[in-house]
Amino acid sequence: MPEFSYTDLLPLGADDTEYRLLTTEGVSTIEAGGRTFLQVEPEALRLLTETAMRDIAHLLRPAHLAQLRRILDDPEASPNDRFVALDLLKNAGIASGGILPMCQDTGTAIVMGKRGQNVLTSGRDEEAISRGVYDAYTKLNLRYSQMAPLTMWDEKNTGNNLPAQVELYATDGDAYKFLFMAKGGGSANKSFLYQETKAVLNPKRMLAFLEEKIRSLGTAACPPYHLAIVVGGTSAEYALKTAKYASAHYLDAMPTEGSPLGHGFRDLEMEQQVFELTQRLGIGAQFGGKYFCHDVRVVRLPRHGASCPVAIAVSCSADRQALGKITAEGVFLERLETDPAKYLPDTTPADLDGDVVRIDLNRPMDEIRAELSRYPVKTRLSLTGPLVVARDIAHAKIKERLDAGEPMPQYLRDHAVYYAGPAKTPEGYASGSFGPTTAGRMDSYVEQFQAAGGSMVMLAKGNRSQQVTDACRAHGGFYLGSIGGPAARLAQDCIKKVEVLEYPELGMEAVWRIEVEDFPAFIVVDDKGNDFFTEGDTGPVLTIGRR
């Protein structure tokens, strides 16, 4: 019988994070019972949360930006890899101004805190933290995405992005430590749990299993990804939660070897093998190449002998998280990069102008389709003219009209449709952050809409199902992929006018008409039934200047 010995399931090493001081107010110490206690006022929790949510909506970690720059400097990166990386760096520069968030889906606010036993609060910590989330989302140009269930079938947007997901834990020490995250729907939807058996626990079988599952991630969540894989877990939900933390690099300081005590550890060798696997897939940074992932984290956990959960999660190009802490010295937040421009190369816009097909969206739809039909999938486009914007709820409403025998709205017959939903529009701007949403959510509508003469040219992010390819071949339609991630750059540089066409009561889910200029896109699915993501050769057809 082994002697009792305790270990944390996820033991962490020293914290080498660079923090900045927000305030020394709202924290104090008192002596009682021979111990020194840290008193934390609700305002300190509110301020820390509000500032964290503001920062992660607009700023990125220096390490993430350095990884984007490495793509530009890698001679083995594809031109499309470099094109996406450069656009994401430009987007980071615009977002750092604090007006336009880096992504239009400003996410679910997630806060995880660990309160030491010598920390005293009012006891209503979740409320103070939620107030900080509320203040950030209502004051800034962020989007409200949380739907309150009124009945099993009916929902209403809460109008302030609450509720937040707040999880607080007890630990030892005299500090209150936090992880703040903003998780968009596209990234959250790429969290998966697989209930496997011991049969997967050998190198050959594991790599084959992971290749299949990683391929299925697709590009809808805006790669390059920070990919996390967790093998094992005391429960299914613990495996998934660990994968989320690992994708945020929260577990980087874990041990790199296991022990009979049963704690988790990082498998560095497996991380390298999986990273090399992702580079061989050919998917690249959205449109073919090497950089499907920035990096990989693989965590091995203990498991019940009859259960072997495997969890996969990603953090997307909007890599939004920051650490915070409250100590006797004050309230601190992780220092994110305020000057992303330092990571940009000496590349001018002229370097990117070659081999780009310019599409005039002011022409009749038949002429636009005839022009697109001249080019193969993978062709890079620059779109100028009007687009109609419609996503989930608008599609559902239009389907109801078609099912009732009504005609397809003329605006979907005359114009290309952009799947997107804007963040709030700052004063003096034509648009708030307005990047593409995940195309796959609208797949089930395409056949019916195209048969009725609408949605003949679609614009969004990520791969589509076979039913979309079949519909485009049957009806002469096209799916164009836009770069997922640079929502701030698209708002500032490409979107010149925004107006509501229909369903204004739906807020950001309304049908919009927008005017765009030099809006970047690629042909992903054409009218001949070719699909970029299912072709064997995912190499680029275009060249982009590089210095």
Image (spheres, rainbow, N blue to C red):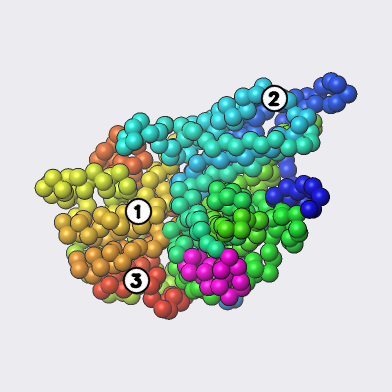
Identified at 68% across, 64% down, the residue is 267
Q: Dot 3 corresponds to which residue?
A: 531
Q: Is residue 471 above or below residue 107?
A: below
Q: CA distance from mark 2 to mark 1?
A: 43 Å
Residue 210 falls inside the magenta stretch: yes
Residue 233 falls inside the magenta stretch: no
| Amino acid at circle 1 | Arg
Image coordinates of residue 507 in percent, x first then y, are 34, 37
Dot 1: few (<14), some (14–19), or many (≥20) neighbours within 10 Å?
A: few
Q: Dot 1 corresponds to which residue?
A: 441
Query: Quadrant where the C terminus lies?
Result: bottom right
Per the rendering, the mark at residue 542 is none
Which portion, as a residue range, is magenta?
198-215
- SS at badge 2: loop
- SS at badge 1: helix
Marked residue nearer the N-terminal end (2 or 3)? 2
Residue 415, by quadrant, is bottom left
The overriding secondary structure of the stretch rendered in magenta is helix
Residue 362, by quadrant, is bottom left
Q: Dot 2 corresponds to which residue?
A: 121
Identified at 75% across, 29% down, the residue is 119
| Viewer-side residue, 313 vs 485 | 313
| Amino acid at circle 3 | Asp
Front of the two marks 2 and 3: 2
| Viewer-side residue, 260 vs 547 | 260
Q: CA distance from mark 2 to mark 3?
A: 56 Å
- SS at badge 3: loop
| Amino acid at circle 2 | Thr
Identified at 36% across, 56% down, the residue is 439
